[in-house]
Image (tube, rainbow, N blue to C red):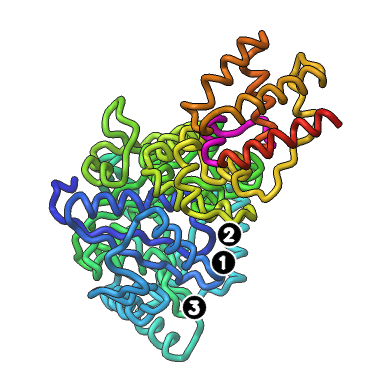
Amino acid sequence: MENNRPVRVRFAPSPTGRMHLGSGRTALYNYLLARKTGGTFVLRIEDTDRKRLVPGAEEELIEGMKWLGINFDEGPGIGGPYGPYRQSERKAIYQEYADKLVEAGHAYPCFCTPDRLERMRQEQQKRKEPPHYDRTCRNLSPEEAKRRVEAGEPHVIRFKSPMEGTTTVRDVLRGEITVENRTIDDYILVKTDGFALYHLAATVDDHLMDISHVIRGSEWLPSLPLHVLIHRAFGWVEPEYCHLSVFLKPSGKGKMSKRESADLLKDGYSIYVMDLKELGYLPEAVVNWIALMGWSYDDHTEFFSLKDLVEKFSLEHLNPSPAAINFTKFDHFAGLHVRNLQVEDLAQRMKPFFEKAGYAADLDTLVKIAPIVQERLVTLDEAPDLAGFFFKTEILPAAEELVPAGMTREQALDVARQSLAVLAAAPELTPEAAEAPMRELVEKLGLKAGQVFGLLRVAVTGQKVSPPLFESMMIMGRERVLKQVEQAVRMLEG
């Protein structure tokens, strides 16, 4: 385990798509371990698969990490002593190490054409064998292989996996894993275009960048014996490996995949980090939520800030069991973190969402609004729906909505007139000055508070649902409130 010695860890995504929750959690756990031990967190972009690169994916990854508060110490854009940090810029390094493996007899050039490999695969399928390379070129003499390489014949470089015995590797979460060497294929290390595959590139980089712990997704578990064999072929000590639990769909049935995201968006959720920002979730809530999908501090503590997580995180408390993505739990954390914000901070964070909704929202008013909406918000994008009326130049409710359930239009008109008289007589429209006389009016009229206050709410805000009524009236100001109630009286008279 980490034993609190300063670690060197890396988050090494491929820019082949959008940053999803799984990537976010991997980055977070690496970051937490680095900060907990006073170590170093490296961002390395694994972009050797040139065909699958997605424009803008690297930028979104870095933006997503920044939004979550996961800052790296070395990486693209900021550099560091072990650069460059994009694998596409390290091509010559991998070629050098591939050549060393060939020279030492741990790898070999393979000249098999794609057509031959495809025929071989089809024959293996007919025989119901798992697909594997038949090692034809492994039997070439080093002299012949060298002559064909120098003659410019297209080739890949394959790792010469041992064909007998076993390989045992240790995973922090799963303990010792032993595999039969005959089941390990002679995997390609370098393609015909000279670009190294992940297996070689990641192993060489982890060694050269002095990475002490490799914390990554469990999809890399099948490749772990190969990565360890490459380390051992060079005579290097391998890092500590930790393969994280998989994310399951909210139903708990099946692995979560990117395909489900379109359906989730209809319900206001997403598995993509930057979508969650657009949907108005706080980054603190995302961090808290994903931290607990595969890790726990104890059996009852659930609310964590990033600072708390740094203090409390350890690899010992990781759980290898699959974690179902629970959006109900996410909303619970989202609400808790909104309520944990300082009022000024909440106002600042709500501002872009009001502006996006078309409101010219000034910060002074938002600071007044923040305390009365804070208890009700789960996401920041709910704020304009709830409190946009404060910034409308005209609030015009529907006449029929001014008539509460169980009342006639004439009764509603009477309530509106008497409410106007009470409010006009109040010395000021603060909750202290206005609420008590309005409650007396409710008693006098023999009605329910919900009926009278419901009518007043629609008259003043134009909405059936709003922040607390009397606090809202105080923020709107006496003149505007009275004008709105007078308008309601005229509408009910008409």
The residue tagged 1 is 117
- Amino acid type, mark 2: Arg
**Contact between labelled residues 2 and 1, with CB atoms less than 8 Å apart:** yes
Earlier-in-chain disc, 2 versus 3: 2
In x, y percent, where is residue 68? 40, 53
* Cα separation between marks 1 and 2: 6 Å
Q: Is residue 327 left or right of residue 42?
A: right
Is residue 473 rendered magenta in the image? yes
Helix, strand or loop status at disc 2: helix
In x, y percent, where is residue 107? 34, 71
- Above-or-below relation of 340 to 351: above
The residue tagged 2 is 121
- Answer whether residue 264 is visible to the viewer in this image: no
* Cα separation between marks 2 and 3: 19 Å
Q: Which residues fall within the magenta stretch?
A: 462-475
Q: In this view, does 227 lie to the left or right of 421?
A: left
Q: Which of marks 1 and 3 is in front?
A: 3
In x, y percent, where is residue 390? 59, 45
Residue nearest the observer in this picture, 109 or 425 = 425
Helix, strand or loop status at disc 1: helix
Q: Nearer the viewer, mark 2 or mark 3?
A: 3
* Cα separation between marks 1 and 3: 14 Å
Crowd tier of the residue under label 3, counting other residues whose Cα lies within 10 Å: few below 14, some 14–19, many 20 or above = some
The residue tagged 3 is 192
